[in-house]
Image: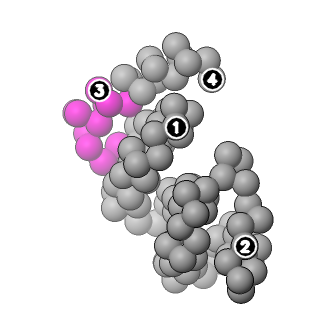
Amino acid sequence: MREDRCAAAEQYARDALAAAPDDVDALEILFQCQRRFGDGAGAERTLRQAMASAPRAQWPRSNLARLLLGMGRTAEAKQVLLDAIAADSENAEARAMLASLDPGGAQPLRPDY
């Protein structure tokens, strides 16, 4: 996504969230733009808001785990993945991500996916 389009999408998402703070689609757009612009703290807040707004949605948990791994916060990422599996025992993505982390806390996943 070009930067000008991402900026427009971010504004669209913020406007939508002003009207409906639990709009999960707008939260996903906002997260993607924040990630694109390197706003890790904003992206984390947005993902946590999405998790609260849509507790059964898998995408915020997976993306939060990736973001935390990219920030070197492996223990927190593992907990997010464990919580995702507890919420949905068939969450294959969370299981695969958790399995890819070795016991020593290595970070085999690329944070920029």
The quarter in which the N terminus is drawn is top right
Visible residue check, residue 58: no
Give the alpha-carbon distance from disc 3 to disc 4, as whole Å: 19 Å
Residue with the mark numbered 4: 1
**Disc 2 or 3, which lies upstream in sequence?**
3
Residue with the mark numbered 1: 38
SS at circle 2: loop
In-image side of 93 versus 20 (left or right) = right
- What is the span of residues highlighted in magenta in the rendered image? 13-23
Visible residue check, residue 10: yes
Residue with the mark numbered 3: 15
Give the alpha-carbon distance from disc 2 to disc 1, as whole Å: 23 Å
Look at the image and say whether residue 95 sits in the magenta stretch. no
**Image point (45%, 39%), residue name:** 39
Looking at this view, name the residue that lies furthest to the left. 19
Q: Provide residue 96's location: percent of width, then percent of height.
A: 74, 72
**Disc 2 or 1, which lies upstream in sequence?**
1
Q: Residues within 10 Å of mark 1 (few under 14, many from 20)?
A: few
